[in-house]
Image (cartoon, helix red, strand yellow):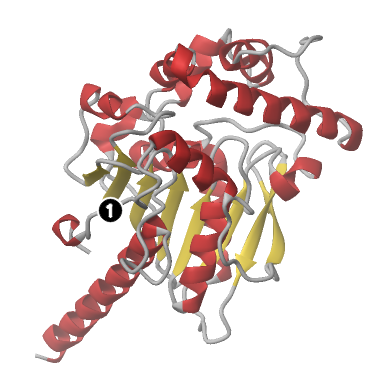
Amino acid sequence: MRVSEFPPFRPHRLLRSAHLQTVLGATFKGNCRVDNATRRIVDLHDGDRLVVHDDQPGDWLRGDRIAILIHGLCGSHRSPGVSRTAAKLNQQGIRTIRVDMRGSGASSGVSRSHLHGGNYWDANSIIDAVHQLSPNSKISLVGFSLGGNIVLKTIGIWGSNPHAQIDAALVVSPPIDLIHCSWHLRQHGNRLYESYFVKQLQNQLRHRRKRVSNLVESEMTRFPTRLVHWDDQFTAPCWGYRNAHDYYRDASSASNLMDVQVPTLLVTAMDDPVVPFKMYADHPMSNSIKIVATEHGGHLGFFGRRGEDPDRHWLDWRICEWCQSLESSSSESASSGISEFCH
């Protein structure tokens, strides 16, 4: 799908507020089928493990397309946008792999370590594991929020030597500059989101401390109430960084964007209250990255008017159409290749 073909996003008439769009996007699941995915363990480079959820449509054949979906901070394979999009892709015959990053979802009791916002090592391990499931399948990467930063970090580090089966990526509202985003969340109007993230991280760690033996820990004794302090006292030392600033700088994908050669679509809203839109203009990007920016939509919201799509979830349908366009392009390329070979 060409960027110019993207239909405009028209918000629900009562939901033009970026905050309402964001809250609804984080809480409203919509029509998702019963989760019957196959759970698979992925072994990671440092001996740790995580869980992915494999949804294979009944008519899917070995060699057909696979989409890997990566959630954001405090999310999981059950996050509304992730689960809805996977269900729609499955209906279109596309196999989906929904990832639970370290410490998240089903990985919370499996991983010893924790979520790292730029963990391209784990992304590579996941891609390699999925590739082994069906070596001839083309693979699409879809990252939501922090998962989008991980996708961009990964394909940026690949540079001119991308994984042969990855033919495209789509990222939604990725926080490409974690230093900027951390500052943004500390501003008065955005403290609600910061408080939400910190509360979720606190509950997650309490739960994991009871379940996981040999959990990677820091010397943090009291739970901070600010995200930057959490990352300074917990995330950074758990991953060997000096402080939060050191971690944010290394995990951000901003410095890798000029090296991206995988065709990539970046979808975001200009009124996003969590990941500021103006941040994207501060960092040069490869010509392989195309941006679609809507006036409204909030952070992972995009709850639209009735009748524009089969349901109100505008973003879900754009991801599905994008995946279908990749299939059409692959088919045309294959036909062209056969024709040239025959001549």
Above or below for 309 versus 315: below
Q: Is residue 121 left or right of residue 208?
A: left
Q: Is residue 287 left or right of residue 219?
A: left
Residue 136: x and y, percent? Answer: 44, 73
**Residue of label 1:** 9
Above or below for 91 versus 283: below
Residue visible at 46% across and 45% down? Answer: 144
Q: Quadrant of residue 272?
A: top left
Residue 337: x and y, percent? Answer: 18, 80
Q: Is residue 285 left or right of residue 313?
A: left
Residue 265: x and y, percent? Answer: 28, 50
Give the structural element (helix, strand or loop) at label 1. Answer: loop
Q: Is residue 238 visible?
A: yes
Q: Amino acid at mark 1?
A: Phe
- Classify mark 1: residues with Cα within 10 Å, few (<14), some (14-19) or many (20+): many
Q: Is residue 135 visible?
A: no
Residue visible at 72% across and 40% down? Answer: 48
Residue visible at 67% across and 10% down? Answer: 233
Above or below for 297 versus 133: above
Q: Seen from this angle, which residue lies furthest bottom?
A: 342
Q: Nearer the viewer, residue 12 or 60?
A: 12
Q: Quadrant of the N terminus?
A: bottom left
Q: Nearer the viewer, residue 15 or 191?
A: 15
Q: Nearer the viewer, residue 89 or 39?
A: 89
